[in-house]
Image (tube, coloured by chain):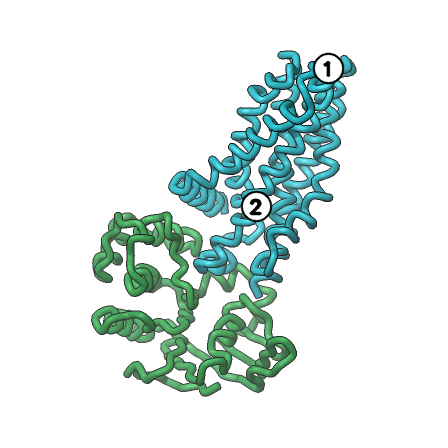
Chain colours: A green, B cyan
Amino acid sequence: MLEAADLRCERGGYRIFEKVSFLLSEGKLLRVVGANGSGKTSLLRILCGLALPAAGEVRWKGTPIRSLREEYSRELLYLGHAPAVKDELTAAENLRISCALAGVPISADNVSGALDRFGIPPGKLVKQLSQGQRRRAALARLELSASVPLWLLDEPFTALDAVAADLTKGLIRNHVGGGGAVMYTTHQDAGLPDSRVIEL
Amino acid sequence: MLAAARTIVARDLRVAMRRRSDVAIALLFFVIVTSLFPLGVGAEPNQLRAIAPGVIWVAALLSSMLSLGRLFAADHADGTLEQMLLGAAPLGVTVAAKAFAHWLVSGLPLVAIAPLLALQYGLPAPLHGVLALSLLLGTPVLSLIGAIGAALTLGLRGGGVLLALLVLPLYVPVLIMGAGSVEMAAAGLGAGGQLLLLGAMLVVAAAFAPWAIAAALRISSE
């Protein structure tokens, strides 16, 4: 499905990584490891099309993602460093809006169910939540995104307690089991059945 | 696509509702700036009447710019902007919806309150309508052009000042036509020409600015 060919990333003229190539197919789980500053986040941003590689190409089902744009965006879920929830909105509003923008069909029951599983009160404003709870509110999207084939998760387990981390791992496992593809970055081994590990 | 646009507008309005102080600040700024001029210039009625359109329009430009800095910066900081860039709808549609929401929050109140402020300048009642109409056509152009600047200066140090330097010169045609329409009407020449030109600017800006905003956002969020 997702193919990276000879990616090279530079920042301010300095090389971060080069010659990164891999193929991520259905039902595979890929872990990216590396020290701080080794370009894990940059790699994920390049893969989802937010940043451009200095050289190389990312292809989705054989077509370069640059020419696909929204067609590719619709097939992908990217969760970055920032939790991507708005302080002024409630957890439920945030979840509903992010699913609507991503084009994932949902119902009100789905939303409260997903938040419930992650232990987030749906009606609470996000600014009243702690860092970990914000993270949970963002990850609740995974629960509703089973129909999205590709998940790119940047440090999904930071700021999570053991319960939430297990929940997230369960969702990742299910997704891979259901034929989806997941790529995630992490510092420590999360104990997931990775198909491949990329070291930067 | 329309659903995505509706979602964005509803979202931004809801956020604005819960941060009412931001909206109030821009509006109060408009009121205070326009109220300072009569105090500084003196209470000579003819002079006040002559400067009224220009002063009200300049204050509208500054007030609309005041809230531009936050247009994308807040979304950039909490990561929701990335999600918009990766949305299912074309980015042009999403940013057009954001500019529209910005206008609803920062432009439309100016249109509503301008006739009231015109009273301070002793502007005759028939001109109030022209002033409001010119602002109604002109302020959306300000939001659209301003959004291009806000997208370009996103994440830059000192972006606020740069934004002003970048955007204010681009506001000049709108200012000339907007203030000019009221002056023409005051001179009894009819404001039709200027208002039609403002309308044309709005059509052009609505058609092309969203794509420029989208391109600028892609560059600055890289």
Residue A16, compared with residue B71, is above or below; it is: below
Q: Position of residue B195 (x, y in %)?
A: 70, 25
Residue A165: image tag: none
Q: Residues within 10 Å of mark 2 (few under 14, many from 20)?
A: many
Left or right position of A79 against B130: left
Viewer can see residue B22:
yes
Q: Position of residue A107 (x, y in %)?
A: 30, 49
Residue A171 rendering spot, x and y as whole percentages: 28, 70
| The quadrant where residue A134 appears | bottom left
* Number of numbered callouts drawn: 2
Residue that carries the numbered disc 1 in the rendered image: B46
The amino acid sitting under disc 1 is: Asn
Query: At 25% across and 57% down in the image, what residue appears?
Result: A115
Q: CA distance from mark 1 to mark 2?
A: 34 Å
Is A177 left or right of B141, judged from the image as shown? Answer: left
**Residue under disc 1 on the same chain as residue under disc 2:** yes
Q: Secondary structure at mark 2?
A: loop
Residue shown at 49% from the left, 44% from the top: B5
The front one of A127 and B37 is B37
At label 1, counting other C-alpha atoms closer than 10 Å, the crowd grade (few under 14, some 14-19, many 20 or more) is: few
